[in-house]
Amino acid sequence: MHNIKKLLIALLACTLIIGVAPDVQAQNKKTAKTTKTTKKGGKKGTKGAKTAKPAAAPKPAEPQVVELPYNSTDCLFAIPLQLDKPFGPTTAPDGSGRIMEVVADKAHPNLFEREHNSVWYKVTIPYNGELVIDIMQADVWDDYDFLVYKNTGVYFSNQVMLNKVSPVAVNLSSVDSAALSAAARKAAEQKPKPAGGKKQDEKAAEEPVFEAQPALMPTIGMNPEAKDKMLTKKQTGGFIKSIPVRMGEEYYIVLDNCAPNGKGHTINVSVHVNAYEPLVLFYDKKGKRYVDVDLMILEKGGQGGERPIVRNEHYKGGRVKFVPGFSYTLYAKREGYFSVFREFNARDLMMRDTLMLYQMERTERGSSFQIKDIYFEDGEATLIEGYDSVLMDYVAMFRNHPDVTFLVKGYVQSYGVDAEADMLLSLDRAKTVKEYFIKNGIDADRITTAGMTKNEIKRAAAAALDKNGGFSGIKVELIITGKKSDQ
């Protein structure tokens, strides 16, 4: 009986170590702390009203596994990577391909002794900086190594195979199994206990809290903070120091897993440079929620002309890198909302906050846009030159939605002395704005006009004469009246 008890304890210990091992990487992930706020529920003044529970955050969708092309094991068919866009999680690399390009010899000992389970990637550098590579292993027990080559031009793959070109970066470090086992045991001992029944903060919030998805933590790679310029087979470690790269250069990365029956990975390549990386979000003010959009951001100014840095049909928000010296075009759309179109230079963004928040305006009937930043000649319906450019944003907005019809309503600042004259002036100002839209490509049959009514003039005059009141700053209001397809 005593021996059986010993055997059971040993089996339990083995199960604990093996079961926790795959979670070592997850234990190292940093989760951003976010304060959640909720609105108080129940009717005002109702005794014993219950507090509404905060809505549960939607669970992030499981990442789709990327099938590695069968020929990506060879340099000639290297997978092109988009800068700053993670590729993966992938299926496991399998085999060395048709050609064994990388084989170590006496003259070149710091290479793979041979390719085991490899995959080739390539990336074109859009601007000067330092090359950064992040590789996230699906299984910490895999033994991934990588080499980085600079493309030397014609017959590059042959030169690699004949060892006539040397890698510019080498990471051949071995897996430290003892350290992984110790980390697994420590993780099991320090596993946090479930939180108790503490009450959550009930402070009301005008806008919901945006929770960014936690980034995957790389297990091996290359970054500017690393000290080692190269890691050989006799060393253990994960990261080597970044190398300087220049605009227009092309680099190849060959990633090899020495472990048999391994798993896949995720790879992200970027160029480290002093850049502006704001959080880009899209917000529905009426619905008081962030919305996902079909987003495209183009970078202009590099050797290749326009380069898409974001192309995502279901963009939910995140940080985007804008590099000084480059211009950008942002275009976002979503069914039921007006599209957002912006052109800007990264140099201008450096002076702003770390958040780029775009309001998503609904195209539904009754939605309105109050315009304050245009000016008319005093007592006239003539737009003052130089102050009408703000209307071009609305011209672009309606141009992208040719089915939407709208009303232009004019306003005046009135003391009610001559209500009839003020009503006519407000209508004339609306007609002036309509002509502006027509002149800039908006069909006339989409636009109706209106001025202030006599009652509105009286209310505006009363508000202006009140000691705590004043004139409204609204010059023109655009009100959605429907869609041409509904008429």
Image: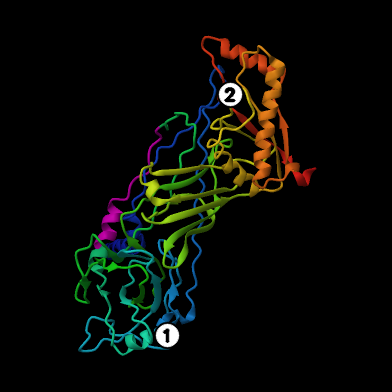
Q: Horizontal and vertical percent for residue 216?
A: 38, 58
Image height of 4 relative to 341, above or below = below
Secondary structure at numbered mark 2: loop
- Identify the residue position indicated by label 2 in the image: 378
Q: In this view, does 222 lie to the left or right of 125?
A: left
Q: Report, in whole angstroms, how far the alpha carbon at label 2 lies from the one at label 1.
A: 78 Å
The answer to whether one can see residue 324 in this image is: yes
- Identify the residue position indicated by label 1 in the image: 97
Q: Give the range drawn in magenta.
A: 182-198
Total numbered labels = 2
Judged from this view, the residue extending furthest toward the right is 487
Q: Which of 216 and 317 is in front in this view?
A: 317
Q: Horizontal and vertical percent for residue 123?
A: 39, 71
Q: In this view, does 482 lie to the left or right of 351?
A: right
The answer to whether one can see residue 337 in this image is: no
- At label 1, the amino acid type is Gly
Q: Which quarter of the image is occupied by the N terminus?
A: bottom left
